[in-house]
Amino acid sequence: MKTAFVFPGQGSQFVGMGKELAENFASAREVFAEVNDALNQDLFRLMTEGPEQELTLTANAQPALMAHSLAVVRVLAKEFGINLKDYASFVAGHSLGEYSAACAAEVFSLTDTAKLLRTRGDAMQKAVPVGFGGMAAVIGATYSDVVALAKTCADSRYVCVAANDNADGQVVLSGHMEAIDKAVEIAADFGAKRCIKLPVSAPFHSPLMQPAAEVMACALKQVAAQDAQIPLISNVSVEAVTDKAQIIANLIAQVTGSVRWRETVDRLAAEGITRTVELGAGKVLSGIIKRSHKEITAVSAGTIAEIEELARILAD
């Protein structure tokens, strides 16, 4: 089978994440210790003990999700002899998960990836005042209808864009709160079954994030990078990229650009991928892939049992 490895985005974090791996594998403990050192914070304790509201903060959730994903990568390599580049045709990640994918493809070191995600989380939070912008999930409408809804809610004062194209019938809007509130009111006129404001603290993946994009442009240009060992499908271009300069340019554009996940999964299918493996916390991406492309076997690996099963499958 032709395999792609995918990495979850924000929202998949949970208190207790990584605990089982750390209790059983020294290789996982090494990852969590390295991330703690990079951030000068006991992030692992927050991951395993909470409190949940602190773990959910963007600046914590982003490196925490990456740490969990990369702990799984390290366990697969050190404990089971499975190196991703020997099995993966592509890697991809949803929003912050694209950084996890880049780290797994050896573009950035683990330490640098943790620092980049802390910088990204802080910058995205500070880009606009809390309450100034927001996001809403539009359920049941086509992507083109949601784009039309966004245009109706935007004007010379207010930004409103389709920020996450996750799947057919699941698109997320982002922008000024006034525009988001209007979208919730009139979404049914554009074919939506529901339009629900999301519990996020900023309008991610919208032009309002431009200050954060400038911060990330500086941060990304200061880290050592190398060409990807596995082709990385970009959120913003849906192109398979290995060139380090292009990967960095795409990550900068991603801050204000839309996450084109539906098209990413379509691209994987078009490339002949028959199996995706979601590495890390949750099963959100696997669920989307199963619903949208039934010909792809979508599995998740975040627990020891799942990792052992994955190792057995890949060894066959």
Image (tube, helix red, strand yellow):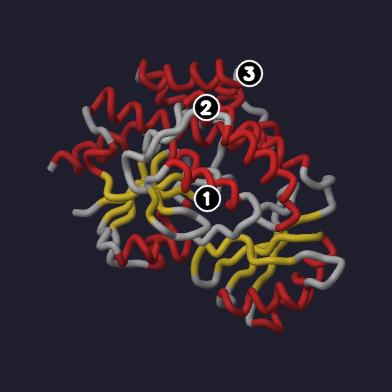
Mark 1 lies on residue: 250
Residue drawn at x 66%, y 34% is 59
In the displayed structure image, the side of residue 170 where residue 122 appears, left or right: right
Three-letter code, disc 3: Gln
Q: Amino acid at mark 1?
A: Asn
Q: CA distance from mark 2 to mark 1?
A: 17 Å
Total number of numbered discs in the rendering: 3
Between disc 2 and disc 1, whose residue precedes? 2
- Judging depth in this view, the residue of 206 and 184 nearest the camera is 206
Tell us which disc is closer to us: 2 or 1.
1
Q: Position of residue 205 (x, y in %)?
A: 65, 55
Tell me the tag on residue 41: 3
Alpha carbon of mark 1 to alpha carbon of mark 3: how far?
29 Å
Q: Is residue 109 above or below residue 240?
A: above
> Foreground mark, 3 or 2?
2
Mark 1 or mark 3, earlier in chain: 3
Q: Nearer the viewer, residue 235 or 224?
A: 224
Secondary structure beneath dot 1 equals helix
What residue does disc 2 label? 112
Mark 2: which secondary structure? Answer: helix
Point 41% across, 58% down: residue: 239
Q: Position of residue 77 (x, y in %)?
A: 28, 28
Which amino acid is tagged 2?
Asp
Q: Dot 3 surroundings within 10 Å: few (below 14), some, or many (20 or more)?
A: few
Left or right: 300 as drawn, with respect to 216:
left
Which one is in front in this view, the residue at disc 1 or the one at disc 3? 1
Task: State which quarter of the image contains the C terminus.
Answer: top left
